[in-house]
Amino acid sequence: MTRPVEPQPSPAPGSDLAIATRGLTKRFGARAAVDGLDLLVPRGSVYGFLGPNGSGKTTTIRMLLGLVRPSAGTSTLLGQPVPQGAQLVLPRVGSLVEGPAFHPYLSGRANLQRLDAADLTADARDSRQRIDAALDRVGLLATAGKRYRAYSLGMRQRLAIAAALLVPRELLVLDEPTNGLDPQGTREVRHLVASLASDGTTVFVSSHLLSEVEQMCTHLGVMSDGRLVAQGSSTEVRGGAAPVARILTEQPTVAARILTELGLVGVEAVPGGVRGTPDGIAPEKIVAALVESGVGVKEFTVSSPSLEDLFVSLTGEGFDVSG
Ligand SMILES: Nc1ncnc2c1ncn2[C@@H]1O[C@H](COP(=O)(O)OP(=O)(O)OP(=O)(O)O)[C@@H](O)[C@H]1O
């Protein structure tokens, strides 16, 4: 049996991390839904937890929040081990996993009042102030008197986030917050996440929609089949993708031979020409070699693959980029 880690009263080493896991694993029967995850989520980041459906994102979030017991591994939230220190840290963590059940015939404000009243740790005397602050934070103060059923999809999701903000939070964990939203609702949630992050709240947001994550995240973690296949700042993750040289020419066979002789990697034919990974070979050297061999170069470009190309190569699956 492993020794339980004691809750720590003061920030632990590594407290610059809002979330840290080591070997976090969840098995359902013989199958590992989450397999040996080492998450590193810096405080103050907006961390996009990306992966196709079924790759293990929700199971990971449920373990982080103490909703499901890991089969192996450890986690800390805001420097506290979970589940051991959960009672100390979870009040500082807001989450949106399945979303609260709202009453359609009550107003946004009345719905928050019900949730606030159910929180036995909250002082009832400050209820009005707390609810107004949460509504204001998500931009719903002016429409707080409208019935929930009259809210747009984006307003409903913002109200769900307001419910998570009834007490001040250092970390927000949002599971697919724009799932099922229309483009306007998606924009509203995206702006809200950006504005929460600008106040210093760390946001951990899962998504299978690349377009969402790309625009709002400072850091990315990419899941594929239960494993974390890439992690780091958005720049670092992008930097992991080698640039590709593309040459438009009417002599693709000769061009391909020259590129291969020069040492480019993965040289292949593309419509109208060839492409390959320069692997450190200077662009001017490539062009010079082609021209010296009499290859007519109509166009030459060196570019990094798009984030989508990268994810397809990491996960073997396409991402829905429609937003
Ligand atoms: N309670 C459970 N019992 C058995 N298998 C489960 C259970 N919960 C999840 N799984 C399986 O674990 C895998 C990961 O599921 P999970 O919901 O974590 O993925 P996800 O990345 O969040 O995908 P989605 O966006 O579709 O929810 C899936 O194959 C799922 O069927």
Image (cartoon, grey):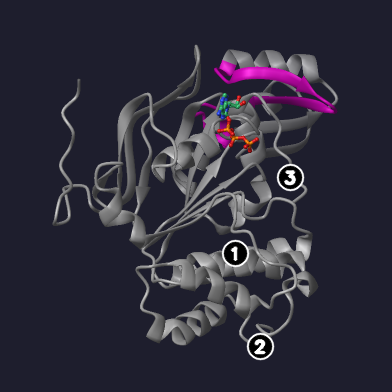
The picture quadrant where one finds residue 102 is bottom right
Q: Is residue 160 left or right of residue 199?
A: right
Q: Residues within 10 Å of mark 3 (few under 14, many from 20)?
A: few
- Say which element carries label 3: loop
**Crowding near pointer 1: few (<14 within 10 Å), some, many (20+)?**
many
**Left/right of residue 186 with respect to residue 163 in the rendered view:** right
Q: Which residue is mark 1?
A: 160
Q: Earlier in the sequence, mark 3 or mark 1?
A: 1
Q: CA distance from mark 1 to mark 2?
A: 16 Å
Q: Are marks 3 and 1 in contact (CB under 8 Å)?
A: no
Q: Amino acid at mark 2?
A: Ala
Residue 31: x percent and y percent? 52, 15
**Kind of residue at disc 3:** Val
* Rendering quadrant holding ligand 1: top right
Mark with earlier residue (1, 2): 2
Which circle marks residue 98 in the picture?
A: none
Horizontal and vertical percent position of residue 42: 35, 52
Front-most of 43 and 58?
58
Across and down, in percent, residue 255 comes to 73, 20
The percent position of residue 298, horizontal first and vertical second, equals 80, 36
Secondary structure at numbered mark 2: loop
Q: Which residue is mark 3?
A: 321
Residue 270 vs 284, above or below: the answer is above
Instruction: Assess whether residue 136 is covered by the magenta stretch.
Output: no
- Magenta region, residue range: 262-285
Circles 1, 2 touching at the beta carbon (< 8 Å): no
Which residue lies under the disc numbered 2? Answer: 142
Mark 2 crowdedness (10 Å alpha carbons): few <14, some 14-19, many ≥20: few
Q: Secondary structure at mark 1?
A: helix
What type is the residue that disc 1 sits on?
Ala
Q: Is residue 32 visible?
A: yes
User: Residue at position x 44%, y 36% from top?
Assistant: 68
